[in-house]
Image (tube, rainbow, N blue to C red):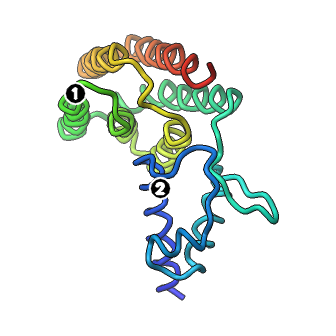
Amino acid sequence: MKKNKNLTLKVYNRIMELMLNYEIVPGQRLVFVDLARQLKVSRTPVNNALSILAREGYLDFVPNQGYSVRRLSRKDAEELYQIREVLDIGFIGQAVQNMTDNKLLAVDRQRRAYETAISDRVHRNLFVLDTEFHLAILAMAGNSALTSRYEDISRKIFLRFRTEELKMERIEQIRIEHDQLYEAITLRDEERARELIHLHHKNSRDSLFPIIFS
């Protein structure tokens, strides 16, 4: 039984990786027989993994048709962004109050990782690194359930549209916003941090929504 659970988890993570690398795209129909062949496993763990992904909201399931990657609707996007902003702003005070040198260093590492990853084009890993920066801040609050929820929400956003269509100007703007938020946290300026988080989310929506829902 444990072996089957481990195999299902392995397949689940592999499918998520395929979605992250855009080898599986929004709207694509997933044939579990083909996935089983591609991942070199039996059909059962693939079917189990797809069922879990559907329950989590990453996939749609239609009887007699199977699974497909759920497209991001405008309503989905607005709700997910709203929840993410509430979590960011709602816990920034606790994160600042619980800040230690080591925790702040972890935030700085993620800030610099994003900056280092910037190249001459937009790539999906930048969205992963942006999430990791925010997760490092939220981790200072000491609530593991919170960070797991935040990561799940972020994935449901950037796994379901073509991030590559975003302009490089926005990527540079994100870097600047990270620097400003890091400085506010370092100074323990909670009010300024909340203002910057709100602006960060607003700029993100303003730049992404015209691309996703054009």
Residue for badge 1: 119
Q: Helix, strand or loop at disc 2?
A: helix
Relative height, residue 45 to residue 83 (above, below): below
> Which quadrant, please, contains the N terminus?
bottom right
Which one is earlier in the sequence, the residue at label 2 or at label 1? Answer: 2
Q: How crowded is mark 1: few (under 14 residues within 10 Å), some or many (20 or more)?
A: few
Residue 124 coordinates in the image, percent (x, y): 38, 37
Residue for badge 2: 16
Left or right of 182? Residue 146 is right
Relative height, residue 155 to residue 197 (above, below): below
Decide which of 38, 60 is in the foreground and name it: 38
Residue 197 coordinates in the image, percent (x, y): 44, 19
Left or right of 78? Residue 142 is left
Q: Residue at x 45, y 31 (%)?
A: 163
Q: Residue at x 21, y 31 (%)?
A: 108
Relative height, residue 52 to residue 160 (above, below): below
Indicate the quadrant where residue 118 lies: top left
Indicate the quadrant where residue 82 lies: top right
Decide which of 138, 49 is in the foreground and name it: 49
Q: Helix, strand or loop at disc 1?
A: loop
Q: Residues within 10 Å of mark 2 (few under 14, many from 20)?
A: some
| Badge 1 amino acid | Ser
| Badge 2 amino acid | Met
Residue 5 coordinates in the image, percent (x, y): 52, 79
Q: Which residue is drawn at 53% across and 26% down?
A: 85
Left or right of 104? Residue 174 is right
- C-alpha gap between disc 2 and disc 1: 24 Å
Q: Residue at x 33, y 39 (%)?
A: 125
